[in-house]
């Protein structure tokens, strides 16, 4: 007879058979509904991570699931060898909402970043007249843009790169939050500056006010494209549709992913000016699943829900209130609390894995980033009472 629980059995199998590229909290989830998830033992948790902001709409949003179900019974995949009737609907909706002139859909965030890099380089050769193979893209220290070989080539995180070289050349790194450093790094070969409006994976790092406006101005004066990675910050997370709107800038390309799929189906996209995405010719770039009708139908529903259920406004109001309340938390191990909307990081002076595990035992799921930051990014559908409960549990902990 074994006292082994179902959870520990499943965890054992995962550890034995799967690559160990993550270090998850040991809860095995089997069901989700709204802000809640349930593990195989029946324990309920409030999801305060939201799959790194991919679940802005919460789990199993009925309208998004309805769109998934209906489309899954009509047509799921055509490849871009043929056209499908949901692609144009998705283009229209996302262009109307974002002000973009052109869209290129992919599946994951990293693929959309790769797409933006390719577009920016080709733009550099065709429109700016940079000599072939000389184009440079400026990126920031402590960036996170995904995990492909080219993207990790410009990571400054030792672990993301070690033993994965040789790396893709053509990237230059500057400190985040320092517009002058960007200006100093620009050369005639610079085609683009790629930046996160708030650095999520780096620990919810908010740049100084005015930074984005300054870099937008520097880019436009120097004929350098401004590529904004809104994969984590976009679609309401920071209390605006896009985090760059806090400073009223107009990027040349915006990269979206995560919540675009409503927490249901992977879809990402580059949203850009015609001058940028217009450089692609048939055969230049592609993806078998990119722009598939199932993903497009789900994304349309996700965007409708975001707007009609006023999730962006919720994020601004509840996030503002939550942040204010959190500021009342004082504890010797809290160094700083940062964030915008419902994207909040509590930086501590000590590793916070233990805090996350204590919260887990109290029924709240969140995950440390960079070992000393507790990231709180609940679904935007969360209620004030639920946030109050998080505050109470955090207060007990700190
Ligand atoms: C998650 C994330 C990515 C990568 O997205 P994937 O879908 O995991 O490939 C890129 N940039 C930012 C800012 C992200 O948060």
Image: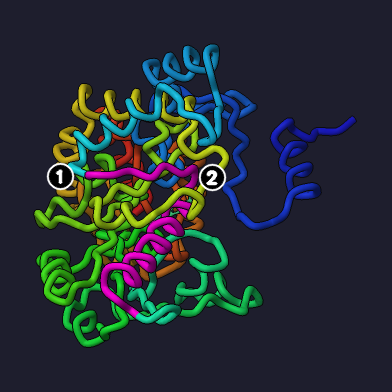
Please, is residue 315 above or below residue 93 in the view?
below
Which mark is drawn over residue 320? Answer: 1
Q: Which of marks 2 and 1 is in front?
A: 2
Mark 1 burial class by Cα count in 10 Å: few <14, some 14-19, many 20+: some
Cα gap from disc 2 to disc 1, whole angstroms: 39 Å
Q: Give the range drawn in magenta.
A: 101-130
Q: How many marks?
A: 2
Q: In the picture shown, does residue 387 fall above or below 73? A: below
Q: First in sequence, mark 2 or 1: give its number.
A: 2
The answer to whether residue 359 is left or right of residue 39 is left
Place of residue 19 in the rendered image (x, y in percent of width and height, measured from the top left) = 72, 54
Ligand 1 within 8 Å of the CB at mark 1: no
Q: Is mark 2 within 8 Å of ligand 1?
A: no
Residue 287 tag number: 2
Query: As drawn, is 67 to the left or to the right of 82?
Result: left
Query: Is any part of residue 332 visible from this angle?
Result: no
Q: Position of residue 363 (x, y in %)?
A: 46, 35
Residue at x 63%, y 73% (from the top left corner): 164
Q: Does the magenta run of residues contain 285?
A: no
The image position of residue 310, as x and y in percent, is 19, 27
Instruction: Look at the image and say whether residue 112 sits in the magenta stretch.
Output: yes
Residue 56 in sight from this viewpoint: yes
Q: Say which element carries label 2.
A: loop
Which residue is pictured at 42% across the width and 52% down the height?
A: 281
User: In this orientation, which residue lies closer to the viewer: 83 or 40?
Assistant: 83
Quadrant that contains the N terminus: top right
| Magenta span: chief secondary structure | helix
In the rendered image of this protein, does residue 90 appear above or below residue 186?
above
Residue occupying the point 28% across, 24% down: 305
Q: Where is residue 70 in the image (x, y as percent from the top left)?
A: 47, 12
- Residue 367 against residue 203 in the figure, above or below: above
């Amino acid at each position: 007879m074994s006292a082994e629980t179902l959870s520990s059995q499943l965890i054992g199998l995962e550890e034995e058979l799967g690559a160990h590229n993550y270090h998850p909290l040991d809860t095995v989830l089997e069901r989700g509904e709204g802000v809640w998830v349930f593990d195989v033992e029946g324990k309920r948790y409030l999801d305060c991570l939201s799959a790194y902001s991919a679940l802005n709409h919460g789990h199993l949003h009925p309208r998004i699931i309805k769109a998934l179900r209906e489309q899954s019974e009509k047509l799921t995949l055509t490849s871009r060898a043929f056209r499908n009737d949901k692609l144009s609907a998705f283009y229209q909706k996302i262009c109307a909402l974002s002000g973009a002139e052109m869209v290129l859909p992919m599946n994951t965030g990293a693929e959309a970043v790769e797409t933006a890099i390719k577009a920016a380089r080709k733009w550099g050769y065709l429109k700016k007249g940079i000599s072939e193979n000389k184009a440079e893209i400026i990126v920031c220290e402590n960036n996170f843009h995904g995990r492909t070989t080219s993207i990790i080539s410009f990571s400054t995180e030792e672990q993301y790169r070690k033993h994965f070289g040789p790396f893709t050349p053509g990237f230059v790194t500057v400190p985040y939050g320092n517009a002058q450093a960007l200006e100093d790094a620009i050369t005639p070969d610079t085609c683009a500056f790629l930046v996160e409006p708030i650095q999520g994976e780096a620990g919810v790092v908010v740049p100084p006010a005015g930074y984005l406006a300054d870099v937008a101005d520097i880019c436009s004066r120097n004929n350098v494209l401004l590529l904004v990675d809104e994969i984590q910050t976009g679609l309401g997370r920071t209390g605006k549709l896009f985090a760059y709107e806090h400073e009223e800038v107009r990027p040349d390309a915006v990269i979206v992913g995560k919540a675009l799929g409503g927490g249901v189906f992977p879809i990402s996209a580059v949203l850009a000016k015609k001058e940028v995405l217009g450089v692609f010719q048939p055969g230049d770039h592609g993806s078998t699943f990119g722009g598939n009708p199932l993903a497009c139908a789900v994304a349309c529903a996700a965007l409708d829900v975001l707007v009609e259920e006023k999730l962006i406004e919720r994020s601004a109001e509840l996030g503002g209130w939550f942040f204010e309340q959190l500021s009342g938390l004082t504890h010797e191990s809290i160094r700083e609390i940062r964030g915008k909307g419902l994207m909040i990081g509590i930086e501590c002076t000590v590793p916070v894995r233990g805090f996350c595990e204590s919260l887990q035992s109290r029924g709240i799921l969140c995950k440390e980033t960079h070992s000393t930051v507790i990231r709180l990014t609940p679904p935007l559908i969360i209620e004030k009472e639920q946030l109050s409960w998080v505050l109470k549990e955090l207060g007990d902990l700190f």
